[in-house]
Image: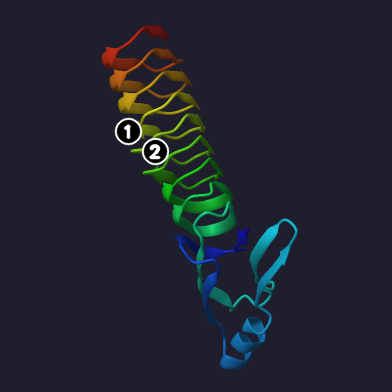
């Protein structure tokens, strides 16, 4: 379990049976004393219990208006076969090479997930989620920012609102619920779409298609399977 309160979080899977952690912080303040008083209260906690190993960062309140966090970056190497849970806010999350599956909960983060083998459950808001080169069941939710999934072999459950869903070069059953643009290209497997307030575009689908749209058009081209469209 990796939790970062703010800033950039990068998690890498490796073939060692231990954690390796690098925590970088840079503070701007009115003077060196003020900066030191703040950084002395920043915490990096590492502990374990019956449920697993926990890594958490904690920042004190920014009471002085002339103090600000210029950089907060946590880089963690974790055993690749372990199941991973990540949390972060107001920064970025990058996860690469994890084989035990991933559960992610974030807000206001740019999220990038690559080479995740195992089930993915990811939730975000206000910033995009990109998932590539992954296998397993993928359940992803976002709002007000894009969801982009490319080159994955997975059954997909995708939910978004007021932004874009893009599904490219994937294989598996896909269920998409959105209120914005939906693009599906070069997909193998059944696709079910419920959408409103954005166009639906499906090109080169090998599988059945059911699509329901409201207030915007549907564009469908080169589908090898049954097609059921409602507008």
Residue 98 screen position, x and y as percent = 47, 53
For this rendering, which residue is in front, 47 or 113? 47
SS for tag 2? strand
Q: Quadrant of residue 48?
A: bottom right
Q: Do the CB atoms of the residues marked 1 and 2 lie less than 8 Å apart?
A: yes
Residue 24 screen position, x and y as percent = 51, 76
Q: Is residue 145 visible?
A: yes
Asked whether, in this view, residue 23 is left or right of residue 171, the answer is right
Give the alpha-carbon distance from disc 1 to disc 2, as whole Å. 6 Å
For this rendering, which residue is in front, 101 or 64? 101
Residue position marked by numbered label 2 in the rendering: 149
Label 1 CA crowd tier, 10 Å (few <14, some 14–19, many 20+): some
N-term-proximal mark, 1 vs 2: 2
Residue position marked by numbered label 1 in the rendering: 168
Q: Quadrant of residue 147?
A: top left
Question: What residue is drawn where x is 53% and y is 46%?
Answer: 101
Q: Quadrant of residue 228?
A: top left
Asked whether, in this view, residue 68 is left or right of residue 43, the answer is left
Residue 187 screen position, x and y as percent = 32, 26
Task: Identify the image quadrant of the N terminus.
Answer: bottom right
Vertical order, 191 against 93 (above or below): above
């Amino acid at each position: 379990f990796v939790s970062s309160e703010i800033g950039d979080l990068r998690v890498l899977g490796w073939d060692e049976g231990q954690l390796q952690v690098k925590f970088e912080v840079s503070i701007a303040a009115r003077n060196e004393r003020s900066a030191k008083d703040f950084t002395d209260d920043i915490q990096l906690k590492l502990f374990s219990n019956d449920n697993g190993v926990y890594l958490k960062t904690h920042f004190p309140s920014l009471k002085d208006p002339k103090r600000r966090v210029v950089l907060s970056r946590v880089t963690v190497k974790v055993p690749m076969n372990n199941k991973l849970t990540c949390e972060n806010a107001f920064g970025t999350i990058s996860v690469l090479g994890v084989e035990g599956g991933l559960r992610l909960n974030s807000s206001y983060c740019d999220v990038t997930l690559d080479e995740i083998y195992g089930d993915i459950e990811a939730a975000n808001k206000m910033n995009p989620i990109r998932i590539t080169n992954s296998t397993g069941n993928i359940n992803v939710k976002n709002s007000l920012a894009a969801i982009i999934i490319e080159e994955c072999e997975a059954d997909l459950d995708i939910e978004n609102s007021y932004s874009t869903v893009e599904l490219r070069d994937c294989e598996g059953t896909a269920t998409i619920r959105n209120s914005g643009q939906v693009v599906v290209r070069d997909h193998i497997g059944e696709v079910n779409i419920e959408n409103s307030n954005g166009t639906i575009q499906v090109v080169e689908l090998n599988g059945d298609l059911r699509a329901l749209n409201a207030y915007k058009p549907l564009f469908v081209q080169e589908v090898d399977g049954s097609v059921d469209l409602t507008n």
